[in-house]
Every structure is written in C-alpha cells, then in structure tokens.
Amino acid sequence: MLVALLALYVVGAAGINHLDAATGERKAAAREPETAAIAGKPATPPPPTYNLTRALLLAEASYCTATEDQPLLPAELRKTIIVTKVVDNHATRAVVGWDASDRSLFVSFRGTENDRNWWQDAKFVKIKPYPDYKDVAVERGFWRWYNFLKADVVKALVKAKAKFDPTTSYAPIRFYGHSAGGAVAVLAAFDQLRGSVYNGTRLIGSYTFGCPRVGSSAFAKAFSSLIDDSKAENWRVTHRDDLVPHLPEEALGYLHTPHEAYQKDEVKPDLIYCADSATKEDDSCSNSCYPLGCTSVVDHLSYLGLVQGIGGCIEL
C-alpha cells in the first residue's frame, strides 16, 4: 500500500500550488477559539501568532538547501532569509540562519536523508538521557539524530548571533521541522528551554509538520511546563490521515506535546486548533482517524497545499 500511495504522491505533486507567506497574511481559515471547555477536556488555544505557511516553507528548506553558498529557498523567503550554515551528519541535516523579517535566528531540521519511509524500519525504544529530568523519556532514534547535529548547530548559532545580533543578550530563535525533522526540532526546543545548550538565545517558537511522538507523558509535561513559562509558541501541524503523527503509538507510552493544528481537508489549508494538553491529545483532530484510517503517506508529504520532502524542491 505504501508503494501505491507514494506513486500517487509523485503523480499529484506537480498540481499543488504554493501559498504566499511573504506578507505574513494568514492563508488558513482558523476556527475561533472556544471560550469554554467541555467537561474534562482542555480549552481550545488561541491561534498562533506566527504565520504557519512561512513556518512550513522554512521546514521545507532543510530538504532543499545543501550548501550555505547556494541556498535553495522558496521565492517567498529569498528576500529575508539568510542561510549561514548547513550541517550534515549521518544523513541528518540542519539549516541555520538569520530571518531579517523580524531579526531572529532559526534552525530547520531534516531528520533523515530518505524521510519518506524512515518509519518502515523504525524500532521505537525509550531512553532517559536528562540528568535534570530523571523521569523524562524520549525516543532513542530521534535523540541520536538530534545529537549528530547538536554540537555543530550550537557553534553555527554562536557565529550567526555574533554577525547579525551582537549587542543583545538573547537573540530570539525558532525551530522548524517536518516528519522526523520535527522530532529533532522538538528536542532542540527542549534543550533550549532547559538552558545551558543554546546560550545567548531566547526561544519564541517551535513549529513542526507531520511530527511523530517524541517522548513519554513525562516529557510532554516537562516540555509544556517550560514552554508555558517562556511564553514561546509550540505548534505541531497534522494533516488528515497522515500516518506519522501516530507513531510511536500511545499504547507504548508516548504522548504528543501541545498544541495541535489540524488540517482536515486533503488540499484546502484550513486549520482547526485542537483542544489538547500536556496530558491528553484531542481525539477529535488527527487522532480521529486512528486506528484504522491513519495510513496515508500522501497526506504526510503534503501540508497546507504544499509538497513536503525532496519532492517539494522541484517546484522551487
């Protein structure tokens, strides 16, 4: 089935049009936040303050930009995005740079070179790598991919800050990622929030698309507590029957971090902002297709009307 779905993706990829993210205008019609929560269910959060189409284009940059000398960026980003370093290690990649539109640092993560089918051979195992959060467990493979990149990303951010924002104590920073790259972005955001890793930065947002579950319920709680205290945004966008956000399974002790923005339609980029929390995912959003319907690779490779992955680079 996966082969057939990938073939369908290739055929349909050319028909998906780009959306304009340069102006910062919202292209996704948002459901208004609910003022009252259903008993036992979290309230719907307010919409994101950052343009999620722009975030998606920056996530896509990790697939398309191989060198800082010749960055392959969507047209909407070329006037304001400056790529300062591309880190490649063990088939993982991080694109580091400066966003002149609001004077912020960014890192866009690609989890694996072949991001279409990494999940087929995955063996999910939890580890507890944080001395300061002894109960927090994360998926071992995602943690290893992140650590292949971390040291060089830290060095690249220090240089970028010194060049573009040398006078402030803390430069604002955002992390982006699609698929396994989203998991790596979440781990980077957690490190930034914990402190002592990304010194001289201040997290203002973490944005993922088709992201798998990264860690345990203890991880979701710790992450949410830190990001709430920091006043930064954390949004994970899901798409219809995309299979990846349902891996690893909740039954194995994994839980997503909030907040979820759900694209229910196959193509239309309208988003529903879901009522999830650090202890409970919203079963009326992406989880509504589980367990039998969450099988789509096509939905994983298309978000907000834009092709994701290597296939998206051919349109740039």
Image (tube, rainbow, N blue to C red):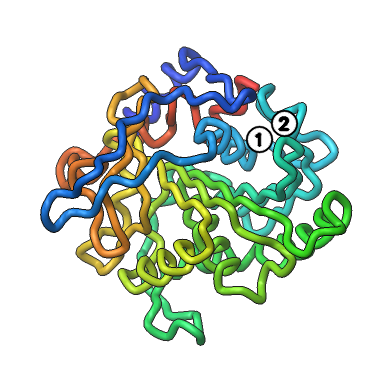
The reply to whether residue 1 is in sight is: no
Q: Quadrant of the N terminus?
A: top left
Using the rendered view, name the quadrant where residue 285 is placed: top left
Residue situated in front as seen by the camera: 107 or 162: 162
Which residue is painted at 42% across and 85% down in the image?
Answer: 134
| Rendered view: 2 above or below 214 | above
The spot of residue 230 in percent (x, y) is 53, 63
The reply to whether residue 238 is in sight is: yes
Using the rendered view, name the quadrant where residue 33 is placed: top left
Q: What residue occupies the far front of the structure in this picture?
A: 35
Which residue is painted at 55% across and 61% down in the image?
Answer: 189
Q: Quadrant of the C terminus?
A: top right
Residue situated in front as seen by the camera: 315 or 285: 285
Is the C-beta separation of discs 2 and 1 under 8 Å? Answer: yes
Q: Amino acid at mark 1?
A: Cys
| Secondary structure of the residue carrying numbered label 1 | helix
Which residue is painted at 49% across and 80% down in the image?
Answer: 129
Residue 72 — which label? 2
The spot of residue 123 in percent (x, y) is 36, 64
* Side of 94 relative to 235 (left or right): right
Of the image marks 2 and 1, the number of the one nearer the N terminus? 1
Residue at the spot of label 1: 64
| Rendered view: 167 above or below 314 | below
Using the rendered view, name the quadrant where residue 74 is placed: top right
Residue situated in front as seen by the camera: 212 or 14: 212
Marks 2 and 1, Cα distance to the nearest angstrom?
A: 6 Å
Which residue is painted at 67% across and 49% down in the image?
Answer: 106
| Rendered view: 110 above or below 190 | above
* Side of 32 relative to 229 (left or right): left
* Side of 112 relative to 75 (left or right): left
Q: Amino acid at mark 2?
A: Leu
The spot of residue 98 in percent (x, y) is 76, 45
